[in-house]
Amino acid sequence: MYNIKTASIDVTYRCNLRCKHCFNFSGVPRRKEMTDEELRNLAEEISELSIDSVCLCGGETLYRYELMCEMCQIIKKNSPQTLVNLVSNGILLTKEKAINLKRAGFFMIQVSLDGFTDESYDAVRQSNGQLSKVFEGINNAIEAGLEVSIATLPHKKSLYEFESIIDYCHDNNLYELRAQPLMPLGRGKENYEELALTSEEYDILKDIFKKKEVELGNKGSKTAINWGDPLDHYFMLQEVNYLPFLTVNAYGEMEVTPYLPFTIWDLKEKGLSEFIEMRIPEKVLVHPLINKYVSRVYSVEDMYYPDGELPRMYLEDNLNIMKEIEEIVL
Ligand code: SF4
């Protein structure tokens, strides 16, 4: 018996930034994204699954913030125990938006903070000096009563700022600091050499985290320091024999993970309820291509596949293997 615990839905690939590490090339969407109506229907279907948490991701999700509030309300109405979170770069997070997100029932907002100074922040985010707006956005979220998680990419220019970043999280009673390694995907691949830490630099980071963990522990801090490893997706899939999470891109295509260019189910053709009724999550990992690309990943470097081997994710269309998956199930 399988149990779907979480869902992640990309609501748009529009974005006000063009970050150097963005694995999904957010900026201007390449194709027509899901309509408001399609996203409302998806929220309705997801609410019937009683899952633990739903994350609305992007792109800059706040471009569709009114719709996200509606989606959150739909999910919470039918499934009050489901935690609904969103991801944002924080620059557009005004007081009013933060209050409305809280009213709609959101639990947590994950805000990206890849540096503590304009120089280090813009080495990745290329925002032209908008870091102060991120801090404002975080304050707005705190004042509105939302939990705040900080997502951060450790890179060469931010490495020695982590003591300050962690102190900032503790001082503001934030939920967590979630550090994520650079992935060799999308713009992250194009800028890998420039940004990626060496193994010696990772060791320095590890020591800083260890020291700060002890300090936070002694202070009884609420802030957790977590390593948000994208490999966890792969390891979980290698361990279980079913798909324990739902991943939907902004074009309405379901994927095994956001890091592999396979469409396993196209919601424009058939709804989520059919995906569940046909018990696709129990069989999808049997597909030879899924099996091959899931089982070979043991390090962040393994996430990369050479151009030409598979479609370039988010630049070219996914390989649609929905019919083959249906045949496996039937
Ligand atoms: S990393 Fe986030 S903020 Fe940056 S371009 Fe991608 S979606 Fe936008």
Image (tube, helix red, strand yellow):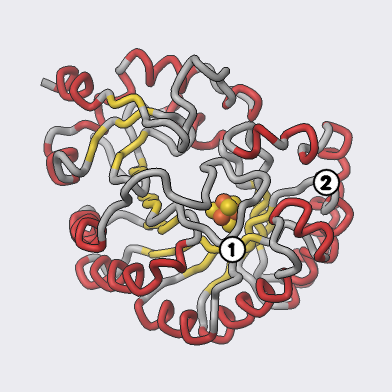
For mark 1, what is the residue?
A: 89
Q: Does residue 48 appear anywhere in the picture?
A: no
Q: Secondary structure at mark 1?
A: loop
Up-down relation of residue 290 to residue 108 (above or below): above
- Quadrant where the N terminus sits is top left
Residue pictured at 15% horizontal, 18% vertical: 327
- x and y percent of residue 193 in the render? 78, 32
Closer to the N terminus: mark 2 or mark 1?
1
**Quarter-of-image position of residue 307:** top right
- x and y percent of residue 283 in the render? 25, 24
Q: Does residue 297 appear anywhere in the picture?
A: yes
Q: Secondary structure at mark 2?
A: helix
Residue pictured at 70% horizontal, 77% vertical: 172
- x and y percent of residue 128 in the render? 73, 64
Up-down relation of residue 330 to residue 258 (above or below): above
**Quarter-of-image position of residue 321:** top left
Which numbered marker is on residue 293?
none
Q: How many marks?
A: 2
Residue pictured at 32% horizontal, 69% vertical: 67
Say which of 227 and 70 sits in front. Answer: 70
Quick check: is the Cβ at mark 1 less than 8 Å away from ligand 1? yes
Residue pictured at 55% horizontal, 22% vertical: 297
Q: Nearer the viewer, mark 2 or mark 1?
A: 1
Amino acid beneath label 1: Asn
> Label 2 neighbourhood size at 10 Å, few (<14), some (14-19), many (20+)?
some
Up-down relation of residue 172 to residue 280 (above or below): below
- Quadrant where the C terminus sits is top left
Say which of 317 and 2 sits in front. Answer: 317
For mark 2, what is the residue?
A: 205
Q: In the visual, does 114 lie left or right of 37? A: right
Q: CA distance from mark 2 to mark 1?
A: 23 Å
Q: In the visual, does 306 lie left or right of 206? A: left
